[in-house]
Amino acid sequence: MRRYGPKKELQKSLYCLVYWLVHGLRIIGDKRGLEFFDFIEAVAGVEVSCVHGGLNCGFSFSVNDLLWKHSQMEERSKKKLLIEVIFGGNIINPGRLMGESVGNKKKCFFPYFCSQILLTPTITGSEVACLLPNVSRDLESLYLRVIFKLVWLEVNVYGAAAASLGALTLWVLYKRLFAKSTLSVLPGPPSPSLFYGHIKEVFNPNGWEFHNDLLKNYGAAVKLDGILKKNMLYVFDPLALHHILVKDQNVYDEPGWTYAFNHVTFGDGLLSIRGDDHRKQRKILNPVFSIKHMRDVLPVLYPIAHQLRDGIKNDIHNGLECIDVLEWTTRAALEYIGQGGLGYSFSSFDVNKKGDAYGDAIKILLPLMLKLFPLKDLLPYIVKIGSPEMRRKVLEMFPRGLVSEIRDASDILTEASTQVLRQKRSALEKGDEAMENMAGKGKDILSVLLKATAKDDISEENLLGHMNTLIFAATDTTTSALSRIFHLLSEHQDVQSRLREEVTAARQAYGDLDYDTLQALPFLDAVCRETLRLFSPVSYISRVALEDSVLPLVWPVKSADGKGEVKEVLVPKGTDVVVSILSANRSKKIWGEDAEVWKPSRWLEPLPESISKAHLPGVYSQMMTFNGGNRACIGFKFSEMEMKMVLSVLLESFIFEPGLPITWDMGFVTVPRVVGETGNLPRLPMKVRAVN
């Protein structure tokens, strides 16, 4: 039989199949123990016998065969092989099967634990047999773990693996094609791919047209297909959103891959914990994001805006035809959250540093993570394998490429946060004078948090996780929104002129504006709100149904057959739910016929009654931009304050005009790119000139 070649060829040939497998395994029910053993035989060339007795399931195999005839394996792969037996998602045995040669036979260590029960295998020569109680109820996880090891531990697999996965894929397709889903009553576009469904369209960086088509032609609850026809619900109906994000938020949780991704990238912060831990940590953090604290910290941040202004002036003085506004706003956002959030300066405006490795890592991390999206369902299992040290060693097996780039960017985040925390704690021990001499002058979010939680049980892991989360979330989203405003102002010179008049008059009267004065500028507020409504930095969020549930609709949708209306949706357990922020913020039923027009003046007039009657569950200005419920953006007031401060300072001094042609990627966070350019780093080159 043909073998797979080097690692790259193996990954290319199996990644897609493994991704299909992850979804397919979820629908295979009990009483399929024999299929499991047939499957293993096909993958590994192992002779397997199966014994059933009541709720018990046993198996035996040859140790030599299970190790894939070690001469056919790379030496380092042979030493890392792990076998785990899983049921119901819980590990029965995280044991190592490390064969030790003794003549032509092997000794092996193969203990099994299930809860408190020790399962003793029968070992005869190189044969291992074991009886597992109560396993036949849920065997699908067994498939996943074994195949997962084949991909990531670089084991050379026989071509039979592909054939087995292909057969399993056909079985999954058969089940899903002929099993009628309760979502089938909903309208939806035809699936463009039998395998990928609408995944590539929904999560496409250039998916604006697809999302707009759903908004205009299918109603506020739409049936889509996931991988291998998996149930997917696309929704922006206000009542349904209230149930998903507020009333039934324990039923509709973020997907496991989201928690896993955030945990790997940021640590144990708000984005990677759930349940009681999340509620406890959010309760601790809420006070440091209050309006009272915003008033205290704002004066500390104005010097950053002045540095930003001086840096752009220097570029103009040096005769640059176009200035990358995104680069400057990213530097500023990093410094704002550094000094205002962590009480630490990243020296983002150092004249000797044209670029900043930390800022670059922040800018490229989300686009890089998006490239791993097809493997998202493997992540919850990756983070549970072995110890952190083992997982780190696996990551270090990738000296180049996508995995190494994400690893290095994540390392930069962790290193910076650890350094900040150590310095902050040292200053706190020395007293108020030491705090006054630090960036942030002791009024930053971290200082307030450390003082407030001195007696609370908050671990260093949680603190580092919160810091990484804060740096990342506050930098990318705020930079996206702020750069979008400058781009829009360059295309609407009348709006820019009016806004400049307002902020200039205020600054000439009061100098650097305090929090309440900044918030009271009506046109500045209108420009920010309208941009955040129409061009939210985040276009959608994901949820998964943890149990069967019913979603009521305030706007009934036409049924798929066109013969009636659907007033409520029966959502099966396991359904992927896409909450469309973009569509909720652009719905004509809420915002009127000009909903898709950027019109700041709408906020200076009485808003249509349809907006208040919609009861969107968002935490900000009756829109969904900053999400809703207990996982809403905790720092949206800080972000809004930062945007208004930067706009007030820069518009007094500069006129912004279009530069190179720009397109905007949707992604996890929208970013600008120069039309025709390739590469990971987004850019926003604009013509900038002094007012006088």
Image (cartoon, grey):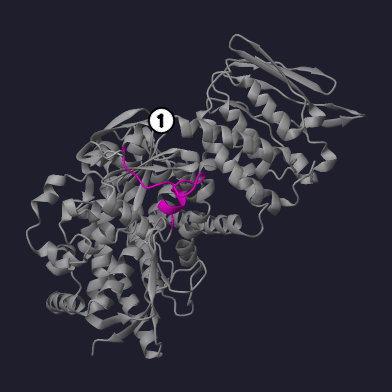
Q: Is residue 351 left or right of residue 132?
A: left
Q: Position of residue 252 (x, y in %)?
A: 34, 35
Determine if the magenta segment contains residue 87. Answer: no
At x 28% / y 69%, what residue is drawn? 485
How many residues crowd around disc 1 within 10 Å: few (fewer than 14), some, or many (20 or more)? few
Residue marked by disc 1: 180
Q: Nearer the viewer, residue 57 or 526?
A: 57
Q: Which quadrant of the view contains residue 137?
A: top right
Location of the N terminus (image quadrant): top right
The quadrant where residue 363 appears: bottom left
From where the camera sits, is residue 83 visible? yes
Q: Nearer the viewer, residue 456 or 382?
A: 382
- Tell me, yes or no, if residue 635 can be seen here: no
Name of the residue lying farthest toward the left: 606
Q: Give the side of residue 582 with respect to residue 465, left or right.
A: left
* Magenta-highlighted residues: 186-204
Under mark 1, the amino acid is Lys
Left or right placement of residue 573 versus residue 625 in this view? right
